[in-house]
Image (spheres, helix red, strand yellow):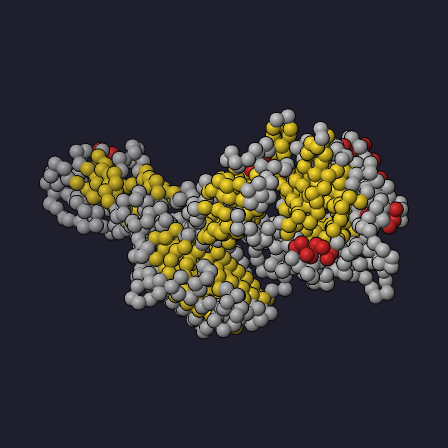
């Protein structure tokens, strides 16, 4: 097989010089079923991505996703335009693409695709063709493409020494230049014309026959007739001399080829029909056929595309391909984006087809909407035919919807919504199901289901940092102007005064570094980017965005980066097209200790950009208000905590959107599962907590005191007496601690240390504001009496939420000075030991910090 493929490549390279064979993987959905001795199938390929698993590209053909077009929203581009010096001829291009997947012909074929031709001077055109699958990639025979130029990669060409496409069965030429439909260059047949008419038919569509028929002219339609049928007196196949691809609202081309087996007088013939539409909101019009072809197709077929340019050129592009069977019903589905962030809007276009020749009512439609997708609107378009109807659907109900469709009619559901979260596999899947419901025979159910996948994006912080050429920021750099690029690579305290970031300016804060503003933070535009664990502390107020600039203002907080404002925070809306937004990654933290006001009402202030491991936090410690329809975030992965009023006292309301919300008057007890570790309930004077929360620094301290108890009241220490130890455990870090364990083993046996009090909120975690108290008792022995004192020390250990262990040995908060009467001295091996003095027959200490003088017995 490898030798066969190599032989094919050599032949192709001989025919198309300078061509490079490119094998890439496409996401192709292909299913098949057996139905009444026939084989049903559906092949769907949107060609919007930049990877594929079943396509061979040759010559100038390539995928435009992330290569001229946004990632996930590309096309298969067969040719481009050429820029050449004046008086120099263009070399011309040839590009073609072959699907590896083959399919049976016994039930007939329906081929549905969109195309776009634009940007050049109008030549030559492109073809799509069905050919014998034995010539397909991986087949048993050698594939040879058709001729260049007006042959469009399908028909023969004497000029280019081509006998035509190997194994060709039927080829459709989308011919803006006009030579595919004539008999020049030894082609077999063409449009009729009378001299002195020009033998060239621009903006025509022509269907040619098989290799066996010498690619004879079957049917064609000229520009004027196409325009009349499609309702456009100025119709052209292409959009010439434009610098970028026209939008679908101004230029749209979609075409369906159907080949249907029919028995006439006990003889099977093949009915060919070509239908087209030039607006998404109109119905298809039949532009060629139906007409009959006597020649039977090969048992299995393959699909290919070819395009040519010469002295004139164009971009020739194709996408949203479906290959399936005629009859019954079918459904296709596409998303307007192949890749999205959480919070982005996503639009699904679902086309439902009646492929029967009679009107059908009571068909069943169901859209299996994915989790993490919130529907905002649903619309049904009848595409210009009042017989096309959908009943009782809404944004809350897209299950078992009854649909009526005219004969050969198409209806379209437009489902719009917002991506609210991240599935485990980072893919949003949406499946539409359309069933005949017994209203017509539907022998092929593979085309009754359509699924589209959209990848959830998260920008990597791996490359976060200061770009090459950035200047190290200095304390006096209080104004950042257009073109300034500053880097904060270590903690920087700006001089006192207002800090202003203007449109076009950029400031990058490195990981672990902190930028401190002593005054008002004003961002009229530009970019502030904070790398993981870095932060910005504003000791003052903040104004974010400016209503008069019309420029975007963006703050990006990567993983565990933070932005703290001690005063008020005002978000101004920069205008109808510009935005003031904060992009937040996992664990990022915004802390607003003063009042918060948000003006934007058409977009949220927070865009979530993480991977769903940890929520981002937006914390308001004082009043929060908005512009009436203001929302914090579309993302479920954002937590909004409001510790005070929200939209009260006559202020406009603000809502969480899809963010998880604790408030108003939020407390840890009210929302224990949403509360971030390290955030205190008491908001008075509690600002600058964000840094400790995102940069967890667990720490613990243990204090230990001991008190002698004269159990038998005889006035001195003996083996019947006790020492009661008290322990106080402090959280000296910035995150709660758990699994508190005190070990007291110095005295030979482990003391039974018991918890007494301190867990105020009873959550089992030692919070920063809590002090946990423990106690233990020790039985004095004779050796202790002889030493006239007991030396003891303990150790405490705990864990933070990430199971990081911290330890501390005990200290005596008020150690007895050695001048204390009866003091046994400091143990050099345990200088931090808690010492309890034991009275002999003259002096005893009932309290280690208060001693008493007694008479000798």
Q: Is residue 568 above or below residue 769?
A: below
The answer to which of 120 and 358 lies nearer the viewer is 358
Residue occupying image coordinates x 41% and y 52%: 659
Q: Which image quarter holds the C terminus?
A: top left
Q: Is residue 423 left or right of residue 26?
A: left
The residue positioned farthest toward the front in the image shown: 265
Q: Which image quarter holds the N terminus?
A: top right
Residue occupying image coordinates x 28% and y 41%: 791
Q: Is residue 158 left or right of residue 617?
A: right
Please state the horizontal and vertical placement of residue 702, each as a whole percent of the image. 32, 46
The residue positioned farthest toward the top in the image shown: 37
Residue occupying image coordinates x 88% and y 46%: 186
Please state the horizontal and vertical placement of residue 139, each as a whole percent of the image. 76, 32
Q: Is residue 158 left or right of residue 167?
A: right
Please state the horizontal and vertical placement of residue 546, each as a whole percent of the image. 48, 70
The answer to which of 692 and 842 lies nearer the viewer is 692
The answer to which of 559 and 139 lies nearer the viewer is 139
Q: Is residue 605 left or right of residue 280?
A: left
């Amino acid at each position: 097989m490898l030798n066969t493929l190599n032989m094919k490549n050599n032949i192709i390279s001989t025919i198309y010089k300078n061509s490079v064979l490119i094998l890439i993987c496409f996401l192709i959905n292909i299913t098949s079923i057996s139905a009444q001795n026939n084989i049903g199938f559906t092949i769907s390929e949107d060609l919007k991505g930049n990877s594929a698993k079943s396509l061979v590209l040759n010559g100038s053909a390539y995928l435009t996703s992330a290569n001229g077009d946004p990632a996930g929203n590309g096309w298969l581009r067969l040719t481009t335009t050429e820029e050449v010096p004046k008086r120099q001829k263009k070399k011309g291009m040839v590009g073609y693409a072959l699907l590896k997947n083959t399919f049976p012909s016994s039930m007939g074929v329906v081929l549905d695709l969109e195309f776009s031709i634009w940007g050049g001077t109008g030549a030559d055109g492109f073809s799509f063709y069905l050919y014998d699958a034995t010539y397909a990639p991986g087949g048993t025979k050698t594939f040879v493409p058709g001729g260049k130029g007006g042959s469009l990669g399908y028909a023969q060409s004497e000029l280019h020494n081509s006998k035509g496409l190997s194994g060709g069965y039927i080829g459709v030429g989308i011919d803006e230049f006009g030579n595919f439909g004539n008999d020049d260059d030894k082609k077999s047949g063409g449009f009729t014309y009378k001299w002195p008419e020009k033998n060239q038919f621009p903006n025509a569509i022509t269907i040619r026959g098989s290799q066996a028929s010498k690619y004879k002219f079957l049917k064609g339609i000229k520009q004027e007739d196409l325009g009349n049928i499609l309702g456009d007196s100025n119709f052209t196949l292409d959009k010439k001399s434009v610098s970028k691809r026209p939008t679908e609202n101004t230029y749209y081309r979609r075409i369906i080829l159907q080949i249907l087996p029919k028995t006439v007088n006990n003889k099977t013939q093949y009915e060919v029909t070509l239908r087209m539409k030039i607006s998404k909101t109109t119905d298809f019009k039949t532009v060629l056929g139906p007409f009959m072809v006597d020649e039977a197709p090969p048992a299995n077929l393959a699909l290919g595309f070819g395009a040519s340019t010469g002295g004139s050129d164009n971009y020739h592009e194709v996408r949203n391909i479906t290959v399936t069977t005629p009859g019954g019903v079918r459904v296709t589905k596409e998303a307007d984006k192949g890749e999205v962030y959480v919070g982005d809007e996503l639009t699904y276009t679902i086309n439902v087809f009646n492929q029967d020749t009679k009107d059908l009512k009571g068909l069943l439609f169901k859209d299996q909407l994915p989790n993490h997708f919130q529907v905002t609107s649903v619309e049904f378009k009848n595409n210009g035919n009042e017989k096309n109807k959908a009943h009782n659907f809404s944004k809350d109900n897209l299950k078992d919807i009854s649909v009526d469709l005219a004969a050969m009619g198409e209806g379209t559901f437009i489902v719009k919504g917002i991506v609210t979260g991240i599935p485990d596999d980072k893919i949003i899947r949406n499946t539409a199901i359309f069933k005949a419901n017994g209203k017509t025979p539907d022998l092929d159910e593979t085309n009754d289901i359509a699924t589209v996948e959209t990848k959830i994006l998260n920008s990597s912080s791996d490359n976060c940092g200061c770009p090459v050429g950035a200047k190290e920021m200095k304390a006096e750099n209080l104004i950042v102007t257009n073109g300034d690029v500053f880097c904060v690579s270590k903690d920087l305290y700006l001089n006192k005064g207002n800090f202003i970031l203007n449109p076009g300016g950029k400031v990058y804060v490195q990981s672990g570094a902190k930028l401190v503003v002593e005054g008002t933070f004003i961002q009229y535009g530009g970019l502030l980017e904070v790398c993981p664990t870095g932060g910005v502390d504003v000791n003052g107020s903040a104004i974010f965005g400016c209503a008069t600039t019309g420029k975007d203002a963006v703050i990006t907080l990567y993983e565990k980066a933070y932005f703290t404002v001690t005063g008020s925070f005002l978000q101004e809306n920069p205008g109808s097209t510009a935005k003031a937004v904060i992009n937040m990654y996992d664990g990022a933290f915004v802390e607003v200790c003063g009042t918060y006001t948000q003006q934007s009402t058409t977009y949220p202030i927070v865009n979530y950009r993480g991977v769903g491991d940890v929520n981002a936090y937006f914390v308001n410690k004082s009043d929060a208000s908005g512009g009436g329809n203001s929302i914090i975030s579309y993302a479920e992965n954002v937590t909004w905590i409001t510790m005070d009023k929200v939209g009260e006292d006559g202020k406009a309301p603000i809502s969480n959107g899809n963010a998880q919300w604790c408030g108003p008057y939020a407390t840890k007890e009210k929302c224990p599962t949403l509360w971030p570790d390290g955030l205190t309930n008491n908001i008075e004077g509690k600002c600058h907590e964000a840094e400790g929360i995102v940069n967890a620094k667990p720490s613990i301290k243990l204090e230990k005191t001991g008190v002698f108890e004269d159990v038998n009241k005889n006035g001195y220490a003996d083996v019947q007496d006790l020492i009661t130890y008290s322990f106080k455990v402090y959280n000296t870090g910035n995150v709660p601690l758990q699994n508190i364990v005190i070990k007291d083993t110095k005295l030979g046996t482990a003391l039974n240390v018991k918890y007494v009090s301190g867990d105020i909120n009873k959550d089992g975690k030692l919070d920063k504001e809590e002090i946990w108290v423990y106690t233990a008792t020790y039985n004095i022995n004779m050796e202790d009496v002889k030493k006239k004192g007991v030396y003891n020390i303990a150790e405490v250990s705990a864990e933070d939420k990430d199971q990081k262990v911290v330890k501390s040995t005990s200290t005596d908060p008020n150690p007895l000075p050695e001048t204390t009467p009866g003091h046994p001295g400091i143990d050099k091996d345990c200088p931090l030991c808690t010492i309890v003095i034991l009275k002999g027959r003259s002096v005893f200490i009932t309290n280690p910090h208060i001693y008493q003088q007694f008479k000798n017995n």
